[in-house]
Image: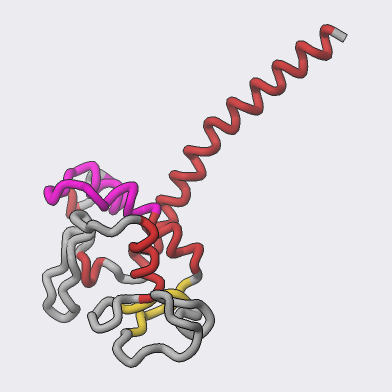
Amino acid sequence: MRAYSRLSKVLAAGIVSILAFAAPARAQDKVEAGLEVWKGAACASCHGVFGQGGGGGEQPEGPSLRRTQLDKDNLKETVRCGRPGTPMPYFLRGAYAEASCWGLPVGSTPKDVVRGGDLIPATDIDALAEYLFARVVGKSSTITKAECAAYYGSPTHPRCL
């Protein structure tokens, strides 16, 4: 009986250890998935590669996400539903038509809302928010070499030198 009790304690400690290491790994996976969403949805074309704010040109000049005052829920709502009356498009597949936005009843899309390029599922928007809050929101306006390497996947990428 004591051997069984000892084995149970060892197994329980092992499971706790595995879970302790798995949770940060899952969170990191979600951040990396969010980076891929950022790149795939062309967010950088308006907000800059590192969320520092876009320069305009061919695309609208998007605000700095490094200095945003939005909390995670409001940032997700903005990505999901866009910002009516501004160039910020919505990206949620089914926004307005199938999912309520900005407290409006489900129905037709308001005329002053811009549709994003490829519409994406809510899980991708959640991952994008994880990426932004892990690596962009609240960061200095000076981009570090480490940030550049994390974005491009290598510290020797030509844009990081």
* Residue 8: percent from left, percent from top: 76, 18
Q: Residue at x 36, y 84 (%)?
A: 115
Residue 96 visible in this rendered orientation of the protein: yes
Residue 82 lies in what quarter of the image? bottom left
Colour setting? secondary structure
Is the N terminus in the top left, top right, bottom left or bottom right quadrant? top right
Q: Residue at x 25, y 83 (%)?
A: 85
Tell me the magenta residue range.
Answer: 130-154
Residue projecting furthest to the right: 1
Q: Residue at x 23, y 45 (%)?
A: 156
Q: Is residue 5 left or right of residue 161?
A: right
* Residue 81: percent from left, percent from top: 38, 75
Q: Is residue 55 left or right of residue 68?
A: left
Asked if residue 138 is among those painted magenta in the image, a careful observer would answer: yes
Please say if 9 is above or below 21. Answer: above
Asked if residue 123 is among those painted magenta in the image, a careful observer would answer: no
